[in-house]
Image (tube, helix red, strand yellow):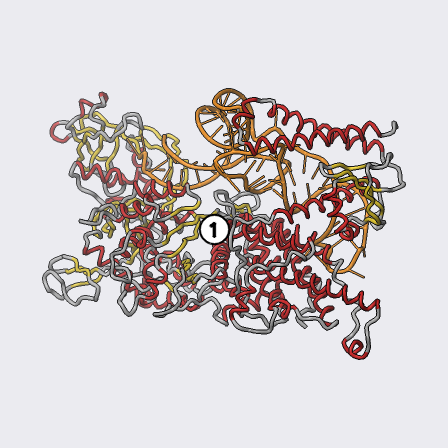
Amino acid sequence: MPHDLPKAYDPTAIEDHWAEYWVRENLFAQPTPKEGDKAGDSYVILLPPPNVTGRLHMGHMLNQTEMDILTRWQRMSGRRALWLPGTDHAGIATQMMVERQLAEEGKKRQELGREAFIDRVWAWKRHYGGAILDQMKRLGASVDWSREYFTMDENLSVAVREAFVKLYEQDLIYRGAYIVNWCPRCQTAISDLEVVYDEHKGHLWEIKYPVLGPGGKDSGEFLTIATTRPETMLGDVAVAIHPEDERYTHLHGKKLRLPLVNREIPIILDDWVSRDFGTGAVKVTPAHDPNDFALGQRHHLPSINIMDDTAHINAEGGAYTGLDRNVARKKIVADLEEQGLLVAVKDHVHNVGHCDRCKTVVEPRLSLQWFVAVNKEVEGRGSMAGTARAAVNEKKIKFTPEMYEKTYLNWMENIHDWCISRQLWWGHRIPAWECSTCHKVTVARVDPTACAHCGAATITQSTDVLDTWFSSGLLPVSVFGWPNITPENRADFDAFYPTSVLVTGFDILFFWVARMVMMGCWFAQDVPMKDGSPRSLADSVPFREVYIHALVRDANREKMSKTKGNVVDPIEIVKQYGTDAVRFTLASMASPGTDIAFNVARTEGYRAFANKIWNAARFIFMNVDKAAEAGFKTPFELLRGTTDPSERVIDGLFHLPIVGENNPLADRWILAELYRTSVVVNEALENYRFDEAAASIYQFFWGSFCDWYLEIVKLRLDFSKTPSREELSSRQPTEDEEKAFAQNAKAVEALGTLVLAFESSLRLLSPFMPFLTEELWRAVFDGNPPRKSIALARYPRPRTTSVTPAPVIEEMELLQSLIVEVRALRKEAGVEEKAAVPVEVRTNDRLKQLAEENREIVERLARVSEVRFVPSISAGLAKHSTAQFDVAVVYERKIDIPAERERLTKEIAKLEKGQAAAERQLGNEGFLAKAPAQVVEGLKKQHAETTLLLEKARAALAALPPE
RNA sequence: GGGCGGUUAGCUCAGUUGGUUAGAGCGCCUGCCUUACAAGCAGGAUGUCGGGGGUUCGAGUCCCUCACUGCCCACCA
């Protein structure tokens, strides 16, 4: 029995089932279009690939919820929707994970050797790498699993290699010795972006270096330098001072003796030195500081690297060789002090860079690395960064919120060359071979056997791998087949590139978004359009829009972190409240620009919403069953209006329902509200206003459909007196039975609208709450729906957005306000909840007619026994007034005079305030002259109403008997 | 040091190109198990829109300024 629903909605009872069903049936696969396929705009989203090592966190869930809403909405709107999932091999993160595993076995990766280690990582990936995608499946993400990618897949690796070789050929990739950020724990270079700075209370050590006199002997004079990293002095090759620093003019051209090392080093002059900082004299260590490196280049100084890969002092360090950098620092400071060369130790707060991945203090260090020259111009096509700037400047990529456009451009304008080599084992190995004969480098698409320069076979491949972001930066082109775009093999690329929107957090704006724009534009521009014409910048971008969403924080706005222990595990919350409730929470809090303070109180509220929908369904199904028992059509038949299962008929129903002018007010009203809601929701989604869309659906379903429509429709849902078919075949119906038939006709009509409105509401809600709506939608069709999933039905989308059927809504609102006023009066007069009382209404003809036509509704919803239309409300009755009517309940119990006086006094005060404000404006000539006529008219009307209400309220107060 | 946000009800947040007397959810108060739903229904209270100044007929909305707060970028040893 599909209609035998439990009283409370239990998400756990249905979610796993549907999640599995969607995957098993491969419902969201978007196959490669074939020649001759119906053309339709594609809607493509590339899932920002989570790390294979990842576990799903709230940020992922927000990100995925937004993408899923967009994709489901577009798919239901008839577009060729593709949401493409995959994972990132995450070089450092994954290597660390496996190293840790090895450590537990007491092993090191070096013991295994490169090949065995990589095998081990693959094994780890096969075993654990799918965890995060499994979580995604559980959450019902409507991705195309048949296209799932991994950044180290064969085809994607081919793309990486092609990109590297091509950039090398274009002279945009070079190898060089530069200062890079070195993580001694990960033992690799990392890019500037992977360094996070923390404020650190350290020291500024002032050390005096002996000035050498003639003959290279100590002159007895000293030059005092200041440093935060005394251990690097082992690599000093000079001391720099400002050329105009008068304190040191006499030292120009002199030399110093580097303490502890006893190396003779020059004093050099450079404008870069700040005279105000420290002592105005800077030690120069080109191998361990980017500024010093630049100084060294300018002054042609040597670089002395004093540390090994693990930040221990190397052979250059003399007595300190083999010491860890921190130990060396202590020892050096102690030794200097002993020699009387330590002048001062001052407290100093400065920023210290840490490895983003492992939080180890990074060491700026000179090393041989590979770089992408992002600013270098290539003849005829500008630079990579320049192209990426143009894409945004020329609005080929649109950012939401717009302000991120500025952030992006600002970064792109100050961008430096990108260090892409990593000294790791796990990743795409750099396709460069060094020749030990001629020492030149061979870069090739196919593994070479001999040096391209001298022909010698003495070549070895670089041991470095590429930055993970190099491969993920290529994803938008590589997942659709690049670089193998041939006439026979380009359908995916033509259909799906550029992708529609990138949905992501700002934390990877530079890491990933910016790199995709650079690489996407650069490589796609070389792929001609299908008709052979050159590809414009607009068609080269990797995505046409970027939607940047908020960060999910905890309920106290704190950033979630493992160390703080405030991480909310989405899977746990989902188990507790249901996926749909969590999704709805995230959607409704996802207003652009602000972070989300995730609060389970909201989720509780949306679980209640899910329950509300569930119970509305129970109510509807209860009546459907009643109707069926009485021999009326099933909702399936009602919905189709025919049993013809042809596509056209089914398609026809998947819009918004309409009812005729003769249907009761409530029917026309609820469909008008549905229409209005669907206008708002579609528009909100166009603009990534998930919050607005969610709020609008919530308000419609709960506030309009349940609170009003269901209550009203109950009056007509009467199937109880239906004579059976057998009975009727044998005799004429009696008079009572004739009445029952009439009643039944009304009931069937009511049920029809009810089911139509409900079915449409489910579709409207479906992208937000896919599980609940799937379950209920199928139940609407008695388990035999016209589509395999609600996700494949049509999204309610009005044909025009301009039409607002206002009169119906206005009439209904008038009726509602009458009911609300009566309810309030009842409460004030202390009428018992169950008692039905007569009311007196003084009003105009319009409301009188409306109230008479809908008398039953008023009576039921306001618990009224009789509506008396009177020329004026009887004396002694407490009344409420609106601009349209006065109303009072006829109830013998005495008015609570003090309470009534208080209420009226408050009301009068409020009205007076409003009246004064309106009069001030209307008395203002400037306002009358300059404000639009419609605003002035509105205010005049408002003022008239306020004045009327004020008169009524004052009269009512005066009429109150004294206490 | 440079840049970008935020500050609206007890809490979390909406509030479109300035336009009538500023909204929602949660929480709170009162009364109800009214046979879809107590995860519910009905009614109710609640705001110097961070401070100050300006522009305007009109400012939560635009401008200036101050305060508090968050983030991003840079990395002066």
Q: Residues within 10 Å of mark 1 (few under 14, many from 20)?
A: few
Nearest to the observer: residue A183 or residue A239: A183
Q: SS of the residue at dot 1?
A: helix
**On the rendered image, what quadrant is the C terminus of chain A found in?**
top right
Quick check: can you spot residue A536? Answer: yes
Q: Give how far across and how far down residue A109 sits, in percent.
A: 34, 62
Chain of the residue where label 1 is placed in the rendered structure: A
Q: Is residue A577 above or below residue A270?
A: below
Task: From this view, report whether residue A247 is shown above or below residue A19.
Answer: above
Left or right of residue A216, residue A60 in this image: right
Residue at x-position 79% and y-position 39%: A842
Q: Which residue is mark 1?
A: A686
For the N terminus of chain A, which image quadrant? bottom right
Q: Position of residue A135 (x, y in %)?
A: 50, 62
Estimate the x, y position of residue A694 in percent, counting from the top left. Answer: 56, 51
Q: Does any portion of residue A49 appear in the rendered image?
A: no
Residue in the foreground of this view, choosing between A358 and A408: A408
Q: Nearer the viewer, residue A881 or A184?
A: A881
Q: Residue at x 49, y 59 (%)?
A: A77
Q: How many marks?
A: 1
Q: Position of residue A820 (x, y in %)?
A: 74, 44
The foreground one among A591 and A181 is A591
Q: Amino acid at mark 1?
A: Glu
Q: Identify the image quadrant of residue A628.
A: bottom right
In the picture provided, is A900 more to the left or to the right than B64? right
Residue located farthest toward the left when viewing the structure as drawn: A454
Residue drawn at x 21%, y 64% as measured from the top left: A445
